[in-house]
Amino acid sequence: MEEEKPESSIEFEDLLPVMVARLGTEGLMEELCKGFRLLMDPAKGVITAESLRRSSATALGLGGCITEEEAASMVREGDLDRDGVLDQMEFCVLMLRLSPELMDMHERWS
């Protein structure tokens, strides 16, 4: 049995199809690039586990609630070339993969 979400709970995967509908593909990619820049380490130009933790506490206002292991796990999830960091392409692919509804929409378009 699927667990019901509280009405006030909004998940990322719920918003991505809405963003595509409102922004179009190009607009969505621009927003994903902005998100990447928000989370990346400016000196390295990639998202590291540390930059993700730092950004989650400051820019995203999550108050440091992401542990080192959680941040490392998130980076590993999208790290396609296994270099230990996320470049912009890997980040965008990960964001799209995290939205099952958007992937279903893509399959219908194909």
Image (tube, helix red, strand yellow):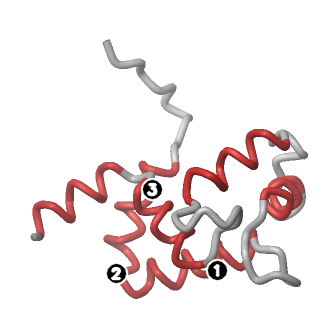
Q: Nearer the viewer, mark 2 or mark 1?
A: 1
Disc on the earlier residue, 2 or 1: 2
67 w.r.t. 36: above or below: above
Amino acid type of the residue that numbered disc 1 sits on in the rendered structure: Lys
State the separation of the CA atoms marked 3 and 1.
16 Å
Cβ atoms at labels 3 and 1 below 8 Å apart? no
For disc 2, the neighbor class at 10 Å (few under 14, some 14 to 19, many from 20) is few
Residue that carries the numbered disc 3 in the rendered image: 15
Near mark 1 (Cα within 10 A), the count class, few <14, some 14-19 or many ≥20, is few
Q: Position of residue 57 (x, y in %)?
A: 88, 53
42 left or right, relative to 88: right
Identity, as a three-letter code, of the amino acid under mark 2: Gly
Q: Nearer the viewer, residue 67 or 84?
A: 84
Residue drawn at 75 percent across, 74 percent down = 38
Which residue was labeled with disc 1? 34
**Residue at x 30% of width, y 58% of height:** 102
Q: Are marks 3 and 2 in contact (CB under 8 Å)?
A: no
* Nearest to N terminus: mark 3 or mark 1: 3
Residue located 49% across and 61% down the image: 95
Residue 35 % position (x, y) = 64, 72
How many numbered marks have been drawn onto this rendered protein structure? 3
Camera-side residue: 58 or 107?
107
SS under mark 3: helix
Mark 3–mark 2 Cα distance, whole angstroms, equals 13 Å
The picture quadrant where one finds residue 86 is: bottom right
Residue at 15%, 61% in the rendered image:
107
Taking the image as shown, residue 82 lies to the left or right of residue 53, namely: left
Q: Which residue is mark 2?
A: 24
> Based on the displayed image, in which of its 4 quarters is residue 9 positioned?
top right
> Callout 3, which amino acid?
Leu
Residue 87 location in percent, x, y? 63, 76
